[in-house]
Amino acid sequence: MKSGQQFRGLSEADAAARLQAEGHNELPQPDRRTPIRIAIEVLHEPILVAFATMSIVITAAPADAAACDGSNG
């Protein structure tokens, strides 16, 4: 920039025309995550399937240790 020069912005008319044509200078807002949407996202996690499977297997297993060792006495 040469000395004596100044930066000049858009004129009021140019700024108004761009605002009308392009809108405000803003980033788009992300979609809001509702509790239902968060729950659905969690249900898609593979680790949840693994934990659920393990809980079903552990719950279905016999609770008595003697039933597991094969002794009949």
Image: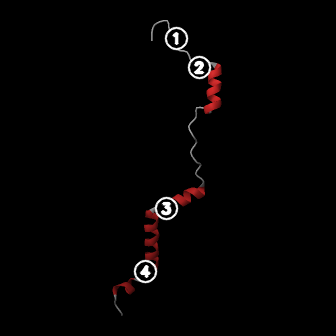
Mark sitting earlier along the chain (2/3): 2
Q: CA distance from mark 1 to mark 3?
A: 57 Å
Write down the residue under mark 2: 10
The three-letter amino acid code for the residue at tag 1 is Gln
Which one is closest to the eye, mark 4 or mark 1?
1
Mark 1 vs mark 3: which is more N-terminal? 1
| Discs 4, 2 touching: Cβ within 8 Å | no
Q: Nearer the viewer, mark 2 or mark 3?
A: 2
Amino acid at dot 4: Ala
3 or 4: tag closer to the N-terminus: 3
Three-letter amino acid code at disc 2? Leu
In three-dimensional space, the C-alpha distance between marks 3 and 4, rounded to whole angstroms, equals 27 Å
Question: Dot 4: within a 10 Å radius of its alpha carbon, few (fewer than 14), some, or many (20 or more) residues?
Answer: few
Question: Residue at coordinates 37% horizontally, 84% vertically from top-left?
Answer: 68
Which residue position holds label 3? 44
Whichever of callouts 4 and 1 sits on the residue coming sooner in the sequence is 1
Residue 6: image tag: 1
